[in-house]
Image (cartoon, rainbow, N blue to C red):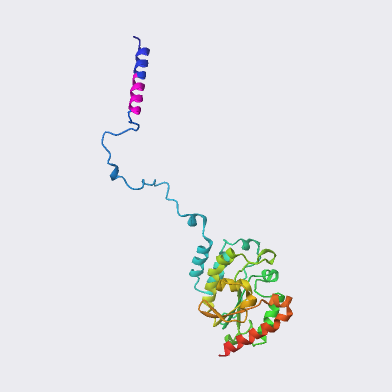
């Protein structure tokens, strides 16, 4: 018998033996030393070159968590302004000219919280500088309050829920409000006013979770541990001059609260 024939016979014999073992249930290779499966770790060891995959929130980025961390780290108003300017999770920032932070005296007893910048506010970088802002200044001047006053007793501090203008002045979306709310809460904590005045539905919803500014206006409540007065937005008053009488009643209510 030639060498080729012997090799062929060995190959067929080996194949037949392997086939018999598979049919008998021996379908995996074993070692010379028995393995105790109960001694194995619950999870296979991870390769040193491939670290464990972090949770999805850490991988994709959690905007609210990032805002909370940045806001909490801000020890001063300037720290907070820089943190908001550096915050890149909100798409509104990409279409805005400026980050509209605040205006007025940070030692004021009254903090006014608005909705978001408009076109003129976006250009100038200050809140409430358009027609609605001019009316707001006149309204509060009527009870002796001004954003330019150096006297904390007669001063105002003004900011918004959103520091960037929504396109077309649309209403802020709930996700945008939730994303920026940690900055709003920290802003109020750092200023520490005696009274918060919310003008319009967006700040009312941001601080209380409820809407309906026309029902809520003039009724005192609480938010963040402080007295809160809802008022209609000056832009609404420009469109509905007859509502100015109710706004005047709200201002007198604020004045009485401050005096007491």
Splitting the image into 4 quarters, where does residue 247 fall? bottom right
User: Looking at the image, which residue sits at the far front?
Assistant: 215
Q: Position of residue 151 (x, y in %)?
A: 59, 86
Q: How many marks?
A: 0
User: Looking at the image, which residue sits at the far bottom?
Assistant: 260
**Residue drawn at 50 percent across, 78 percent down:** 225
Quadrant of the frame with the C terminus? bottom right
- Main secondary structure type of the part rendered in magenta: helix
In reply to whether residue 22 is colored magenta, the answer given is yes
- The answer to whether residue 212 is above or below residue 14 is below
Asked whether, in this view, residue 23 is left or right of residue 70, the answer is left
**Residue drawn at 52 percent across, 64 percent down:** 64
User: Is residue 101 visible to us here?
Assistant: no
In reply to whether residue 110 is colored magenta, the answer given is no
Asked whether, in this view, residue 257 is left or right of residue 2, the answer is right
User: Looking at the image, which residue sits at the far left?
Assistant: 33
Residue range (magenta)? 13-23
Q: Position of residue 156 (x, y in %)?
A: 61, 82
- The answer to whether residue 40 is above or below residue 214 is above
Splitting the image into 4 quarters, where does residue 102 fall? bottom right
- The answer to whether residue 38 is above or below residue 208 is above
Splitting the image into 4 quarters, where does residue 13 fall? top left
User: Is residue 213 visible to us here?
Assistant: yes
Q: Nearer the viewer, residue 140 or 216?
A: 216
Quadrant of the frame with the N terminus? top left
Asked whether, in this view, residue 153 is left or right of residue 4, the answer is right
Q: Position of residue 23 (x, y in %)?
A: 35, 27
Q: Position of residue 46 (x, y in %)?
A: 38, 47
């Amino acid at each position: 018998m030639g060498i080729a024939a012997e090799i062929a016979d060995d190959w067929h014999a080996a194949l037949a033996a392997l086939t018999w073992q598979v049919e008998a249930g021996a379908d995996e290779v074993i070692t010379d030393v028995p393995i105790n499966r109960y001694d194995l770790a619950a999870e296979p060891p991870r390769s040193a070159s491939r670290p464990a995959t972090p949770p999805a929130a850490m991988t994709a980025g959690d905007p609210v968590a990032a805002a909370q961390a940045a806001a909490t780290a801000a020890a001063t108003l300037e720290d907070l302004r820089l943190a908001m300017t550096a915050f890149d999770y909100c798409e509104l920032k990409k279409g805005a000219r400026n980050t509209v932070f605040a205006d007025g005296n940070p030692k004021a007893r009254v903090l006014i919280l608005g909705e978001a910048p408009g076109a003129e506010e976006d250009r100038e970088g200050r809140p409430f500088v358009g027609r609605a802002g001019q009316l707001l200044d006149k309204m509060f001047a009527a009870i002796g309050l001004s954003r330019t006053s150096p006297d904390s007793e007669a001063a105002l501090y003004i900011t918004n829920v959103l520091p960037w203008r929504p396109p077309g002045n649309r209403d802020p979306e709930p996700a945008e409000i939730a994303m920026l709310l940690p900055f709003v809460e920290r802003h109020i904590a750092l200023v520490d006013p005696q009274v918060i005045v919310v003008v319009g539905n967006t700040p009312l919803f941001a601080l209380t979770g409820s809407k309906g500014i026309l029902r809520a206006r003039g009724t005192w409540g609480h938010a963040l541990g402080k007295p809160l007065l809802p008022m209609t937005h000056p832009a609404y008053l420009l469109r509905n001059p007859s509502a100015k009488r109710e706004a005047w009643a709200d201002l007198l209510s604020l004045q009485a609260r401050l005096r007491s």
